[in-house]
Image: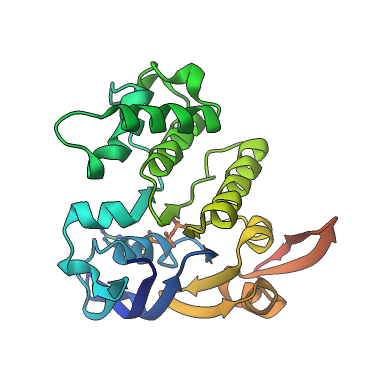
Amino acid sequence: MTGLHAHNLRQMIDGRAVLDDVSLSVTPGEIVGLVGPNGAGKSTLVRAMLGQSRLAHGEVQLGGQDISTLSARERARHIAYVPQRAPDGFPVSVFDTCLLGRTPYMGSRPARKDIAIVEQVLDQLQLADLAFRTMDALSGGERQRVMLARALAQQTPLIVLDEPTSALDIGNQLFTLRLLADQVRDQGIGVLVAIHDLSLAARFATRVALLHRGKMLAEGAWRDTLTTQTIRQSYGVEAEFGQLRDAPIIAPFEVGAS
Ligand SMILES: Nc1ncnc2c1ncn2[C@@H]1O[C@H](COP(=O)(O)OP(=O)(O)OP(=O)(O)O)[C@@H](O)[C@H]1O
């Protein structure tokens, strides 16, 4: 059971279509970058793809099965989710928060293997020094990195992340995207990441999907998806394109272009 496929999703909120005939897939070995302006429907689509939404139309399939027919435990063995906002104010240690990622595999208590995996992930994310701090005693960026650690500890073939770099400094943004790219290359996992930074999306995503007002405006290689015209239409800005070393740079210049 691997690929995640959303077919023709339509979701209504207060009589308005917040997702309108949206299809999107993520399969092992790729990073799909989901971009679009505020309110475009990225988080709504992410939640729908996790099987958490009531849809007016369409279906989400995980490995060919309707995701809504799978138990929470089955889903959690296949998809790890990093939410947009890490919950704050709960006095649980970083270590125990990451251990929650092992829940889909655990009985009533963690096995030695679960502990070892959490230790390894905390080392990998350079969070070992914070392991016994409680989540409510962390900065916003630290909490966000712990949520990523929890997802990695889940060891799933798919990871879905909703703006995992929004609270991170530039070093940790790069570290996070590189780490995801390495996991895709070395472990063959599939990643769906909603992200605002178009340069990072273009640089790290194997495919980019641009959502605008609940519809999929463009999807494919970043050069085809993120064009002067699609950025103008969706974000209302004039963007300039450049390249530094091998990295594409997409910078907004003028507002009010739509
Ligand atoms: N519970 C709700 N009640 C009413 N409207 C909602 C609700 N949840 C989401 N919406 C609306 O649905 C639309 C899509 O929201 P969503 O959070 O998916 O956007 P987004 O692309 O993730 O935005 P952002 O980049 O700001 O995080 C928005 O117009 C939002 O106001």
How far from the left and from the top, in percent, is residue 128? 49, 21
**Residue 88 shows in this picture:** no
Relative to residue 11, is residue 118 depicted above or below?
Answer: above
Q: Nearer the viewer, residue 52 or 71?
A: 71
162 left or right, relative to 101: right
> Which residue sits at x=35%, y=19%?
134
**Residue 49 shows in this picture:** yes
How far from the left and from the top, in percent, is residue 117? 40, 33
For the N terminus, which image quadrant?
bottom left
Q: Nearer the viewer, residue 97 or 223?
A: 97
Relative to residue 204, is residue 138 depicted above or below?
Answer: above
> Which residue sits at x=73%, y=67%?
239
Relative to residue 120, is residue 59 depicted above or below?
Answer: below
How far from the left and from the top, in percent, is residue 129? 50, 17
90 left or right, relative to 189: left
Q: What is the quadrant of residue 154 in the picture?
A: top left
For the C terminus, which image quadrant?
bottom right
Ligand 1: give its quadrant. Answer: bottom left
